[in-house]
Amino acid sequence: MNPHTDTSLPPFLVTVAVVLLGFPFAAGIVKWACLSSWSSPIANLLVLAIFILLVGWVLRSIRRGNNPLRWLFVVLFSIGVVEAWWQPQTFTYTWEPLFFWAQALIQLPALVILFLPESNRWFSRRRDAKNSIAVTEQS
């Protein structure tokens, strides 16, 4: 299949945005695993598995053109930046603010990419396709 004519494949920029989003999530998972108390390993592994599945589902959905999850990412990103900006004392270790801002700097280009015209066309095309399917099913 030609990626330029196949409408089921996301544009290259959407794929780049999802990859950029994946790095900070992966780093956050590693940080959490390293800093967690492993006195109850089964509970930690369960939480870790649920978080990985949830993040994987969100990233996959964004890549597939799910517009509400794109906006959910905007909201979560904004909450995280505002919280870190106004409550820097919530960081336990001295390296955590640097880690957080590095994650934010990786996510910021992804946020911008997800709202470029090419990405907007992808998300609106996916939404329009779902709406036309719903209308056809109602007929």
Image: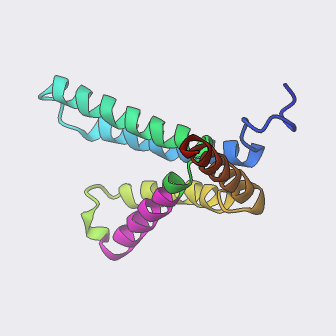
Towards the viewer: 66 or 134: 134
Residue 51, percent from left and from top: 34, 37
Q: Can you say whether 11 is above or below 112 in the image? A: above
Residue under the point 48% across and 56% down: 73
Residue 134, percent from left and from top: 56, 46
Residue 98, percent from left and from top: 45, 59
Q: Can you say whether 82 is above or below 9 in the image? A: below
Figure quadrant of residue 27 = top left
Q: Can you say whether 38 is above or below 17 in the image? A: above
- Asked if residue 79 is among those painted magenta in the image, a careful observer would answer yes
Residue 53, percent from left and from top: 39, 32
Farthest residue to the left: give it.
39
Q: Quadrant of the C terminus?
A: top right
Main secondary structure of the magenta stretch: helix
Towards the viewer: 36 or 71: 71
Figure quadrant of residue 120 = bottom right
Q: Which residues are magenta?
A: 71-87
As drawn, is 94 to the left or to the right of 56? left
Residue under the point 58% across and 61% down: 108
Residue under the point 47% across and 43% down: 58
